[in-house]
Amino acid sequence: MSTEITSGRGLERRKENVSSEITEEVRCPICGSTRFVQDYQRGEIICEVCGYVFTERIVDRGPEWRAFTPEEREKRSRVGSPLTRLTPDSLVTMIDWKGKDYTGRELSLKRKLESLRWRKWQIRIRMQTSIERNLAQAVNELQRIGSQLGLPRHVMDQALDIYRQALEKGLVRGRSIESIMAAAIYAACRMYKIPRTLDEIARYTKSGRKDVARCYRLLLREINLRVPLADPIDYVPRIAEQLKLSGMCVRKAIEILKEAKKRGLTAGKDPAGLAAAAIYIASLLLGEVRTQKEIAQAARVTEVTVRNRYKELAKELDIKIPMK
DNA sequence: AAGACGAAAGTGGTTGA
DNA sequence: TCAACAACTTTCGTCTT
């Protein structure tokens, strides 16, 4: 495909493309789907697949729209505190389960069944919309945290999927959307072996690390997530990259860690500390010396931890550290 | 002077009664 | 809910290069 940026015609064509993209080819930024539900009353476009809510308003929908929507929309598009419901439960007609009509007369069996069915659907629909609304908020959080951490798309998808499961199981009720979402993100990172610590993720939330950790454990317990144990090997490339160490050094460090794992030296130890120690040893063996302090900073642990781990590893694996 | 080392006390989280 | 516990951090003094 050739791009004609220099010619006038090319520019025209590009303009056309852009405008047609906006009116027709809208894709959901979360799941990429092109199917949407339009909610004119609220002025929202909702992704049919993942429930993402576009904040852009739908334009030109009847005269009375324009009259009252701007501030309405202002109110609704705000992120943060929950929206006040305009129609409290007391104002909504609720179909009840008693088989009587409004005068108190018994209904026929057929009518009874019908009314039960209606009631069922009413509850279902209401649940559906509350889930959607919650999900829309959650997606906002996901995007915010995810973009700050620079997470790839498939991890965000996984996080959203975990969150939706949690929501459907009613685990979010009574807890903040933010912390459950943070926990889901953490779980997704672990599943895809993307080394992000709980601290890094919790840093971008208002609800501290403790809360996120509690939610994470809740998710593990209630949804049977298959999250592999944190592996120190996953941390190696990132730390080594920060320290500008060679590929040889990375390979050596991984080799050390594999051996350590085989001998059961890694259980219960902070994976970042282990990775740091292995890198330290590898760097000494290969003459690409870095100080304990540098490595500790890159791995986000203290020198003392690096030291303790490296002493342990060197002793147990019989590695002789060459003296400079 | 900088880095490595190790001891001691403190911290936050887990586990089991 | 509490205490015991292991891992990790902080701090600091000493030794080595």
Image (cartoon, coloured by chain):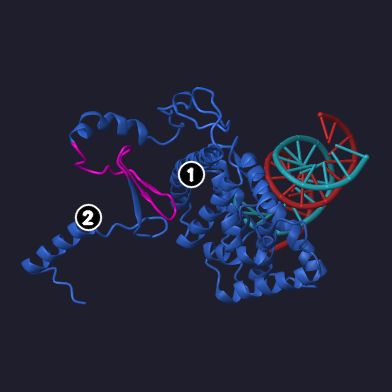
Chain colours: A blue, B cyan, C red
Disc 1 is attached to a residue of which chain?
A: A
Q: In this view, does A205 lie to the left or right of A198?
A: left
Taking the spot 57% from the left edge, 44% from the top edge, the residue there is: A180
Look at the numbered disc 2 and give the secondary structure of its residue. helix
Three-letter amino acid code of the residue under disc 1: Gln
Mark pair 2, 1: CA separation: 28 Å
Look at the numbered disc 1 and give the secondary structure of its residue. helix
Q: Is residue A72 left or right of residue A48?
A: left
Q: Is residue A95 above or below residue A190?
A: above
**Residue where numbered disc 2 is placed:** A23
Q: Nearer the viewer, mark 2 or mark 1?
A: 1
Give the image quarter of residue A65. top left
Q: Where is residue B12 in the image (x, y as percent from the top left)?
A: 70, 39
Inspect the magenta stretch and tell me whether residue A197 lies in it.
Answer: no
**Residue where numbered disc 1 is placed:** A128
Residue in the foreground of this view, choosing between A28 and A204:
A28
Q: What secondary structure characterizes most of the magenta part?
A: loop
Q: Is residue A51 left or right of residue A57?
A: right
